[in-house]
Image (cartoon, rainbow, N blue to C red):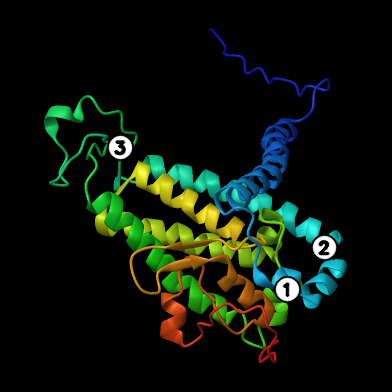
Amino acid sequence: MAHSLCVTRPLSVHGPPTYVLFFGLLLLPFFFSFLFLCSLPQIIENFVGRCLYHGKMLGSRDTETFLNNKAKNQLHTIDYVYLFINSFIEMIFMFQLVHLAINNSNIAYGWHWNLTGVADDAVAEQVASPTGNTTGLNVYNTLVASIFLILFDDAVYAPAHRLMHWKPLYPLIHKHHHRQKFPERGYVDAGNEHPLEQVIGLSIIYYSIVLTAHLFGMHIGALVLTFIFYAFVNVVNHTSYDIKMHYLGVGFEFAVGAHEMHHRFFDCNYAKSCMWFDILMGTYEPYSKQRRPKKHR
């Protein structure tokens, strides 16, 4: 009578445990991406500020107040700790965003122009789409989706940002980000925030993308370009350059000066990409290099 033998493979004592290798492989690209994220945005914002905007600085940068704050503006251990943690959070967010882009059936991958917004069976077989959505480019999944995504994200972020300035809540989360009254280091000053604030901001972006794709469909090209716009806004919002972009009518303006006003006075300009929602909340304040009484801490 044949007997089956159950052979147990002995644990190896010559190599590191599997979980050590796993986390090592996970953290290795993280370290490189951390260095990459800290250097590339600086290069981009310097190119944009110096080449496209001829190095024009915000008016406050030649004032005594700015010079006094600059002398005190040194990064401390807690700043580096938060930057490190937030870079890891960003890496996880990017993994989730890629997962969404290749699994959400509302994300389209067809590169033909499609006015109807319905997938064309004649070209569907020629389109490589991880989501199975072969719809081509149309007004809804490109222009309309991108505009809605920017507006909806700001519509949620602006009041959420204002809530973080509520006195009982402010010292717990958002106060750290306001240690710098005159942002100038681009990505470093943008990412120097409490990790919980980082999670809140990225979650708003993520679910804004999910909702936009559900309502209008979204082309992968529009998603990528809109996300690049987000990254650009967040980085240059924390520089010294007087960068402005006017688009889509009254109030729909991006200006670095608007965000500097928020860092200086705390009680105005809570939105990121445009000032529409600050105008609606009564919190919009035009740029001025002059000092004024501080209304809120």
**Residue 287 versus residue 235 in the image, above or below:** below
Q: Which mark is residue 152?
A: none
> What residue is rendered at 72% in x and 57% in y?
185
Within-10-Å neighbours for mark 1: few <14, some 14–19, many 20+: some
Provide the residue designation for mark 1: 181
**Residue 156 versus residue 86 in the image, above or below:** below
Provide the residue designation for mark 3: 109
Question: Would you say 268 lies left or right of 228 here?
Answer: right
Task: Find residue 101 and report its horizontal and vertical position in percent.
Answer: 40, 43
Q: Quadrant of the C terminus?
A: bottom right
Q: Which mark is residue 78?
A: 2
Within-10-Å neighbours for mark 2: few <14, some 14–19, many 20+: few
Q: Residue furthest top?
A: 1
Which tag is nearer the camera, tag 3 or tag 1?
A: 1
- Depth check, front residue: 4 or 145: 145
SS of the residue at dot 2? helix
Which tag is nearer the camera, tag 2 or tag 1?
A: 1
Task: Find residue 24 and report its horizontal and vertical position in percent.
Answer: 73, 34
Which of pointers 3 and 1 lies earlier in the amino acid sequence? 3
> What residue is rendered at 65% in x and 49% in y?
46
Real-space Cα distance between discs 3 and 2? Answer: 43 Å
**Which amino acid type corresponds to the residue marked 3 in the rendered image?**
Tyr
Within-10-Å neighbours for mark 3: few <14, some 14–19, many 20+: many
Question: Would you say 103 lies left or right of 113 here?
Answer: right
**Which amino acid type corresponds to the residue marked 2 in the rendered image?**
Ile
Q: Quadrant of residue 238?
A: bottom right
